Image: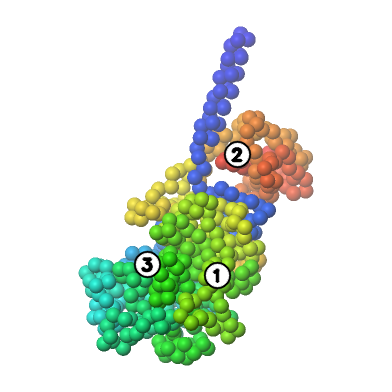
Amino acid sequence: MKTYFTIKKNISFFITLFSIQMAFAQTKTMGVFVNDSANVFKGYTLFAPKQNTMTYLINNDGRIMHQWTKSTWAPGQAVYLLENGNLLRTCMTKGNLGTGGGEGGRIEEYSWNDSLVWSMDYSTSTYMQHHDIKKLPNGNIIMLVVEKKTWAQLVAFGFDTAQFQPDIKQKGFMLPDCVIEIKPTYPTGGTVVWEWHVFDHLIQNHDSTKLNYGVPSQHPELIDAAGDHRVLPLFWNHMNSIDYNAVLDQISLSVRGNSELWLIDHSTSLAQSSSHSGGKRGKGGDLLFRWGNPLTYGRGTVSTQTFFEQHDAEWIHSDCPGAGHLMAFNNGVNRNYSSVEEIVPAIDSAGNYSIVGNNPFGPSSSIWSYKANPPASMYAHDISGAQRLQNGNTIICTGPNGTLYEVTNSGNVVWKYVSPVDDKGPLSQGDSIPHNPVRPEETMNSIFRVYKYPYNYPAFAGKTLIAGELIEKYSTGFKESITADVFKIFPNPSAGEIYFENNFGNHKISKVEILDISGRVLEVFYAEPNSSIEKINLSGKASGLLQINISTQDHIFTYRIIVK
């Protein structure tokens, strides 16, 4: 009889241990992987899954603080949280002008409560909004737009048609970029109040019979029709971000097709923007500054190229370290690793940029740069972005695989999050994230770009922000199977002090969350680096029937306890 009970007890222990080990065998594939609470920036991250229609605001634990679900369009591509609490988002309409990436065509603005307050469609057979927009302090919106230029127009502007990719000849047109400023008319539509066009600022040395014939190296303020001297695609300039500096009244453009960022003057009138004079800097709509690939204006070689099809060229905000500097996500196409680059242009108090002799625009190198270790472990072929935060950290979006990093100035990763949403909605923890069948370099949880907002951002004033559920799904069976015997929690009921005893001795507790029965997070405790939480004290902080979520490196264990 004694032998029987010993065997039964061992079998029971083996079954419990086996079920736990089976659960542990499920590799974590999404959600928060790193959260260094002592060094991560305290704020909320806004992102819109590229393959779905919702937009999330999450905290550093990956819990939903707010979400917008009413739009019926996937992002096309950028989304912003405005200071009034409204969500401004672009929409992927897949209009008549397919660029092969970044199609938009519609802009929507939603209230905090997810009511559509304004929308505008901007897509026809001859032009289409794409990729990015920016709301100006006066309420107007500047946006990236492609416009159709026919074969006859391309010849008239001196393009070398032998340099075109075959699809330009097949379709009979090219899609260069322009910038359009709209004054919204609520609740729908808007009026064009300003514009700037690439084609107004071209130079070429192919056809001497054309008015824009010249020597590109003598005119760095103009745009060479030969581009970067590779074969020219249908979506020629392939701009992918737009930003605005209110102090300078200048616009930043990320021009992927040239591997450059361009700065232009917004102080010009509508007439001046198409000319070579006027505005605060006297240059009209010509380029004030350019950086990343001096080969494109005849003042560099392949070896002097710094950007490689970059994204997200923005000014660092005035309340952040590096204020006024420019930052971009350098995708590193054909270099096979990505980086984030921060540069300091030579600019005077009037907003003019210096260039010395026949040299390219400076600086010669970045003032700060981040790349992973090893470098190839962070490589994003397309999309992506980076934002400097108020504590000096930088949040990075490697868009194709939906992975977000926050790094310190010294390059330490203090937060890592993998998007758990694909085209069908939230995935379950442990699921493999499917690859995009149309874009092999992307997975279906891709994200165009993200922004992180501090707790005191004006949008949150007067709002009730309660940490909700994680986006990724956890099966009830999974939670129940792993909570039984891994940790002993005592006493239960408790007067306030709660102790944790690890029954198997190999799982360090990195975080303990206390939730009420409605799922609201009441308290969060974090372990010191390289240590494990052994006890917490809830005296005066929480009482009643509570849920305890215990986080280890790879798993979350859920228990119930009563605190008197």
Q: Amino acid at mark 3?
A: Glu
For residue 256, say whether it is visible. no
Residue 374 in the image: state x and y as whole percent.
Answer: 51, 50
| Residue 164 screen position, x and y as percent | 27, 71
**Residue annotated with mark 2:** 557
Image coords of residue 315 (percent x, y) = 55, 72
Residue plotted at (41% across, 83% down): 219
Mark 2 vs mark 3: give the one in front.
Answer: 3
SS for dot 3: loop
Image-quadrant location for residue 223: bottom left
Mark 3 or 1: in front is: 1
Q: Which residue is mark 1?
A: 343
Q: CA distance from mark 3 to mark 1?
A: 29 Å
| Quadrant holding the C terminus | top right
Which mark identifies residue 508? none
Q: How crowded is the residue under tag 1: few (<14 C-alpha within 10 Å), some, or many (20+)?
A: many
Mark 3 — residue? 103
Q: Amino acid at mark 2?
A: Phe
